Amino acid sequence: MLLVLALSACSGADPAATVSTAVAPSSSPAATGSTASATSDPSAGPDGSAGPDPSPTADAGAGTLPAPVQREPAPATSGAAADPTASPTTSPTATPPAAGTYTDPTAVDVVVNKRRPLVPLDFAPAELRQPDVATATDNALLRPDVAAAVEEMFAAAGNDGVALTLVSGYRSFATQEATYASWVAQYGDAAGADTVSARPGYSEHQTGLAFDIGQADGACTLVLCFRDTPAGQWAATRAADFGFILRYPLGFHEITGFSAESWHFRYVGKDVSLAMKAAGTQTLEEHLGLPAAPSY
């Protein structure tokens, strides 16, 4: 069934775009990586889309999401993020974390944030596939293990009468580089861009472990109000049962470094997701005993 989503939110390289087309489950190998950010809520996003990919398996197709022209940058954080001359590909103050501390980009427990870049910065997963679920764009590639878990979660949601759609998945270093640059241009400096978009090499989407979801009717797609939709509420409650966590919860931006994204989920495996759910732990940093990452 063909669905048309009028997406008012997030992160394509073309800030002027306003519409994306939702498609039924697809086996297309192409995807361009695109994702979202937040609303004008001060506690509300990271990441975006568009650009070539150095990986042979990655996002070479079309299908970008519009940038929300109504959004305002969240309050700037301290440090290098407030420097309008900061390079979009490097961070003046961040250094690679110590070896062995959740740094393996191929592992499900890797932690990527403003203080923990991927090593190497241009890391690309060895294998990606598009899960057999409804998608809002063709930017839906994920690691095979994550794709399988997404299929299970979407099937369970459907059995509960909730229609989910996959909005975006993997984004390459090159895609994130172009996306971040577009946000810098839109906001006029790195300070604003850093509240809503990860710098290349610092994005979870680059691991193939993270993805954005929406409701099939397009309500509140990539906007903070998604948390109040049936899809958002179901996912927030049930995602842990399938190995996923809500990566950027509301009110925890001083730990995660990003404003709230009620649509951004991250695969960590059931051991971690269920442990966090049982303990009521909200962030991966807290669960693993890692330092907060409010800025670069």
Image (cartoon, helix red, strand yellow):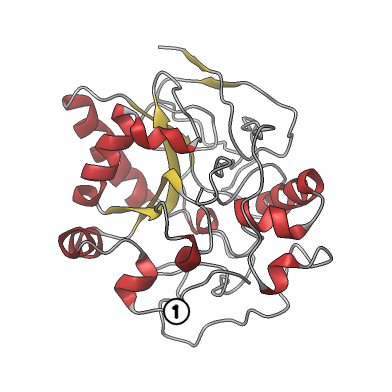
The relative height of residue 257 versus residue 72 in the rendered view (above or below) is below
The relative height of residue 104 versus residue 148 in the rendered view (above or below) is below
Label 1 belongs to which residue? 291
Q: Nearer the viewer, residue 295 or 106?
A: 295
Asked if residue 262 lies left or right of residue 81, the reply is left
Q: Nearer the viewer, residue 292 or 238?
A: 292
Residue 167 x/y as whole percent: 48, 34
Residue 185 x/y as whole percent: 81, 47
Name the amino acid type tagged 1: Pro
Residue at 60% across, 73% down = 120
Quarter occupied by the C terminus: bottom right
* Camera sees residue 109: no
The relative height of residue 207 versus residue 223 in the rendered view (above or below) is below
Q: Nearer the viewer, residue 162 or 82?
A: 82
Residue at 75% across, 62% down = 88
Residue at 19% across, 33% down = 156
Residue at 42% across, 20% down = 24
Q: Residue 252 sits in which quadrant?
A: bottom left
Q: Residue 121 sits in which quadrant?
A: bottom right
- Callout 1 secondary element: loop
* Camera sees residue 273: yes
Q: Nearer the viewer, residue 261 or 152?
A: 261
Mark 1 Cα shell of 10 Å, populated few (<14), some (14-19), many (≥20): few
Asked if residue 185 lies left or right of residue 221, the reply is right
Residue 99 x/y as whole percent: 47, 87
